[in-house]
Amino acid sequence: MAVPGCLAGFLGTAFVIPQRPAKGAARRMPPLVARAAEQEITKVEICIHRDCKRRGGGEKLKKQFEALAEGTGIEVAEYDCFDECPFGPNVRTLRGEEDQFGRVVNKVKGPKMIADILGVEPPDETAGA
């Protein structure tokens, strides 16, 4: 039986089926610290809209970012709203001057998560006790 020309090449092609992880095996993403270092973040914008402020954002979150970003060269600024209000407090990370859109990170709370975003060591929590 003759095989049409368009199928002849297709039938002779070897396919590689990707292996799925075993059931129950954890799918691990690289930590935010590794991703922040790879991304070379130059600026972080904090949402100052009222919805994010109610959820712990605004000036309080900006001060935490500024404290942890000190000496890193990462600029910390304010932004009115990223239109992701239900998921706040929100911040946006930007890479360089040409990056206009960046990446919005939702539910940013606590020094550990802030340190992960900035790619710095988290503060020692026992120092304040």
Image (spheres, grey):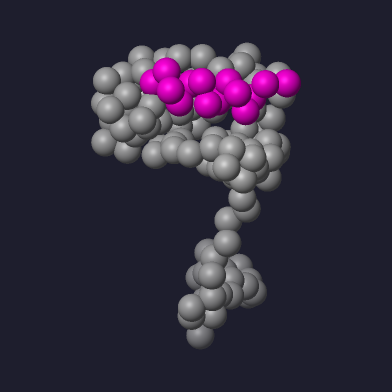
Magenta: main secondary structure: helix
60 relative to 36 in the view: left or right: left
Residue that protrudes farthest toward the bottom in the picture: 1
In the image, residue 123 sits, relative to residue 85, either above or below, namely below
Q: Is residue 64 magenta?
A: yes
In the image, residue 34 sits, relative to residue 26, either above or below, namely above
Percent across and percent down for residue 41 are 64, 27
**Picture residue at 57% right of the left edge, 42% below the top:** 129
Percent across and percent down for residue 14 are 64, 74
Could you say which is closer to the camera, residue 56 or residue 35? Answer: 56
4 relative to 30 in the view: left or right: left
**Picture residue at 62% right of the left edge, 28% below the top:** 68
Question: Does the rendering let one see residue 113?
Answer: yes
**Picture residue at 48% right of the left edge, 78% below the top:** 24
In the image, residue 38 sits, relative to residue 102, either above or below, namely below
Residue that protrudes farthest toward the front in the picture: 129
Could you say which is closer to the camera, residue 77 or residue 28? Answer: 77
Question: Does the rendering let one see residue 42?
Answer: no
Q: Is residue 82 magenta?
A: no
Asked where in the image residue 73 lies, by quadrant, the reply is top right
In the image, residue 105 sits, relative to residue 13, either above or below, namely above
**Picture residue at 60% right of the left edge, 23% below the top:** 67
Could you say which is closer to the camera, residue 2 or residue 124? Answer: 124
77 relative to 67 in the view: left or right: left
Asked where in the image residue 25 lies, by quadrant, the reply is bottom right
Q: Which residues are magenta?
A: 58-71
Percent across and percent down for residue 19 are 58, 75
Asked where in the image residue 42 lies, by quadrant, the reply is top right
Instruction: Count numbered badges in the picture.
Output: 0
Could you say which is closer to the camera, residue 124 or residue 55? Answer: 124
